[in-house]
Image (cartoon, coloured by chain):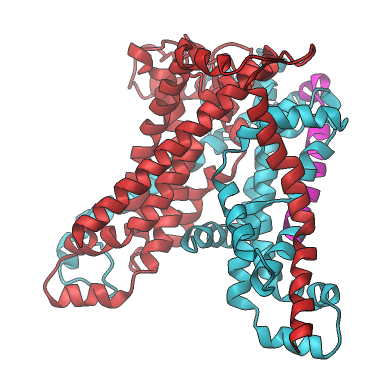
Amino acid sequence: MNNNLKKTGKTNRFFKNFRMSVILLYIFLILLAIICYIPFYIMIINGTRSTTQINLGLSLLPGTGMVENYVKMQDSMNIWRGFLNSILVALPSTLFAGYFGALTAYAFSKFNFKGNRILFWLVLATMMVPTQLGLVGYYQLAGKLHLIDTLWALILPSIANAGTVFFLKMYIDANLSDSLLEASRIDGGNEFYIFNKVVFPIITPGVAMISILNFVFYWNNYITPLALLNSKDNYTLPILIALVKGTYKQNIGSQYLAVGISVIPIIISFMFFSRYIISGVAAGAIKE
Amino acid sequence: MERFRLRKDNYGYIFIIPFFLVFLGLQLYPILYTLYLSFQQYDGISNAQFIGLDNYARLIKDPVFLKAIYNTWRIWLCNFIPQLIFGLGLAAILTQSRIKGRSFFRAIYFLPNLVTAASIGILFSILLGRQYGTINQMLLGIGLIKEPIYFLGSPGWHGWGWPSITVSAILWWMWFGHSMIIFMAGIRAIPNNLYEAARVDGANGWQSFWKITLPLLKPIMIYVLVTSLIGGMQNFDVPYVIGEGMTLGTGEPQKVLLTMVMYLYNTAFKYSNRGYAAAIAYGLFFIIIVFSVIIFIFMQRREKQKV
């Protein structure tokens, strides 16, 4: 961008001569921020405007059509049912991935059993495999297990979440001391008790960090539920939202409102968790 | 004591059992079963029939699959290159302690990455509507254009038209903040005394960026490149929902938005040609493996040349 804005830590001696470029830099940063946020802003505003109002042109202030949009939206599609289904998938998936991921990562980190290294490499290798590779086979298997069109078909695989194991193994390596474990063993706790009562509370911050990311991933997942679910009552939110154009046709206000209902919870949670989410994303990459 | 250790370590096996049961049963088995299906003619209803490599022979000559490969790469490259530039540039700017509001900018640039891709695809297909789309209204309003742009309409020369550029732009919008965060973490990990030494030697900020930041970020850049490539080759959600018309996943206009995974999905679940879809899945996997390996070899060779 600019010669004088690279990392130096102290005031650069050229800095004062380049006020103008600093102003330009801020204009650029702010414009980019607007570009990142404005589609969501228009979505929220247009969700409150009637289709006629929307067709008349852009407005940055809310309209008066929200109730009408909502009634029409609920007439042809039960968005809240999709919302509930998404929670029913994402929440248990996140808990499974977090608990079993921690258990597996703990075993890889602190137990020197035969094959530890090889099995851990196997876990790492699966992270490189595209998720769609097994989709056709999984559909066939789910058919044999009578799991087609059930939410369980989406939840069960989360017990084996390789990325979570990888992340938590690094976390446990760095944050859990062997001496503490030895002390707990001398106190006579059995291994399961030690994991649940000693280890898990210590690694909870790491589990929470990866769980936020996992929740977002399971909440946003589109292709797997699209392939495995076929009745409207079981549809998760992304599947329903993807259908709004065909469902509401000319009723654009309801389309915006429906999309808004799927997006706003994410924006609100991000306002609370952004620090953890961002450090989770960064930590995953740096430890590689 | 020795006995105690042995017994203790064997608990490791018990702890990894749930993970590996599910991994073997619900992940590895389906992957191998897909491989098996790729040698079969199978429509999902009648009995599968072994046909050897016929599916693969058909795949390498299938014009639709070749087009899907081309589309997938075009969409990926057009979003990855600007993504890398913005990610690196912003990371270099936002790691400066004198910039105000760094955490605000960081958070807002990252926000689009968290939102459901399917919702984003739909949101933009409404915003980009030809007649009443807000983006056309805005551009017309400020007089930048005279006629509304048909963003999802004309395919363009070899697909280099509005629809493909639009999808790349959306993906750029969703991912540059993610790359930025990873680069920021990478830059923070570079020891500050390197910069101080460079400054003492009379290097300016721009020189330190090229001579210190970029070379030391190389492992992070490889990580971003490989993960983006793997993700980009699996591109599905946005192009699937955004296309022209009310039917999802057609890749229209003229299939310029048809990606490899869309073709895989349509073949398996719309046309129930499961055997052929399995071959497409392995074709996709092959492409990912080959290019990941090429990237690693290329990077290692360059590393050796320097030494």
Highlighted range, magenta: A70-99
Nearest the eye: B18 or A70: B18
Say which residue appears at 84% left-offset and 39% top-offset: A152
Q: Which chain does red denote in the image? A: B
Residue B259 appears at what percent x and percent y? Answer: 51, 23
In this rendering, position of residue A105 left or right of residue A88: left
Nearest the eye: A25 or A59: A25
Say which residue appears at 27% left-offset and 58% top-offset: B214
Which quadrant holds residue B164? top left
Say which residue appears at 50% left-offset and 42% top-offset: A37
Was residue B43 drawn as part of the magenta stretch in this picture?
Answer: no
Q: Is residue A272 visible?
A: no
Q: Is residue B259 visible?
A: yes
Residue A43 appears at what percent x and percent y? Answer: 59, 33
Say which residue appears at 21% left-offset and 64% top-offset: B208
**Placement of B283 over or under B129, stated as above or below:** below
